[in-house]
Amino acid sequence: MRLLAALTVALVLTGCAVTPKQLSRDEWRQTTQREYAATSDQVLNAAEKVLRLADGDDFTIIHQDNALHASRPWLVYLVLAAAMGTDTWRVETTQSPGATRASVLVSSQAGAVMPMPTTSPGVYTASGAPMAGNIVNGSAIYDVFWARMDWMLGRRGDWMDCKVADQRVKTGAAWGTNEALCNSFNITDKAPSENDRVIPMKS
């Protein structure tokens, strides 16, 4: 119990001491936007397929004329504690000459449940730590999302699985967390078939 408490404090202090890298306006636009020779419906249908393959019916997805909103609650059991949270996605489309511009943002909130001592010796109760929601910073989650969107819309021949996505983070090709699509604790991460493509790959 003391070890768990010490680790929790250490993680909190580490998080406070490290200043996260910040993307500029241009970098955010380059990271979160793409243009496709496709209709808005095709882009949004592709986005839904990407999320469904990641974790099926755990996603709640709502469609609007030019937008998709999705949320996925998750839970991770640890030895002496548990973590829970919700990932939220927003995909929007706008028309540009001869193409559809797509933009995506991902946010995540998380909290912890761990045993806490009570006034009775040797008796513990479950206690939750506060949840916090933040826009996912970095390029990693968007790197894998757009790679899969490119596959869905006939722009790319290979499907970026989580093994490849994680390796890109390790090599520095992408940075930040990709856990909203590649968390081995609670993501199914199914591979698609050719029938899943929204736009066939051109030969």
Image (cartoon, rainbow, N blue to C red):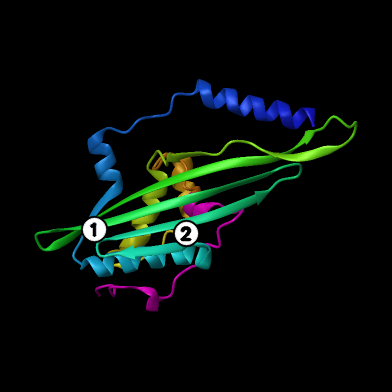
Residue beneath the point at 46% across and 62% down: 60
Residue 188, percent across and down? 55, 62
Question: Within the image, what quadrant is residue 22 found in?
Answer: top left
Highlighted magenta segment, given as a residue range: 180-203
Question: Within the image, what quadrant is residue 93 found in?
Answer: bottom left
Give the vertical position of 134 relative to 158 (above or below). above
Residue 35, percent across and down? 21, 57
Amino acid type, label 2: Asp
Residue beneath the point at 59% across and 27% down: 12
Position of the C terminus by quadrant: bottom left
Amino acid type, label 1: Thr
Residue 9, percent across and down? 65, 25
Q: Name the residue under label 2.
A: 161
Secondary structure beneath dot 1 equals strand
Quick one: 81 or 11, which is closer to the camera? 81
Question: Within the image, what quadrant is residue 67 found in?
Answer: bottom left
Position of the N terminus by quadrant: top right
- Mark drawn on residue 61: none
